[in-house]
Image (cartoon, grey):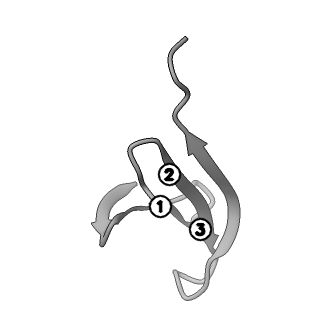
Amino acid sequence: MIGRAEGADIVQLGTRPDGRLARWSFSEITPNSFLWRGEVSGDHGATWRLNVEFTAHRVPAP
């Protein structure tokens, strides 16, 4: 995968072993959280299907 900034977001693009395109997007980035979406495309990027979505939050050290 190759990652690049797109505005305030980070987007990584690559190819899965099955030949489909994969896109990972990191958005809503703050010092304590971000939203990560994993998508796949079977038509060379014309359309994308959401495969997974996570919201991550920093956990304070004990």
Q: Identify the mark at residue 15; answer none if there is no mark.
A: none
Quadrant location of residue 41? bottom right
Q: Which residue is tagged 2?
A: 34
x, y (%) of residue 14?
Answer: 45, 61
Tally of numbered tags? 3
Residue on which disc 3 sits? 20
Closer to us: 16 or 27 = 27
As drawn, 37 above or below 34: below
Residue at 60%, 59% (x, y): give it. Answer: 38
Horizontally, is 7 left or right of 12 in the view?
left
| Labels 3 and 2 touching (C-beta < 8 A) | no
| Residue 55 spot, x, y in % from top left | 62, 50
Of the 4 image quadrants, the one containing the C terminus is top right
Q: In the rendered image of this protein, does residue 28 appear above or below residue 46?
A: above
Residue that lies at the very extreme toward the top in this rendered image:
62
Circles 1 and 2: CB atoms closer than 8 Å: yes
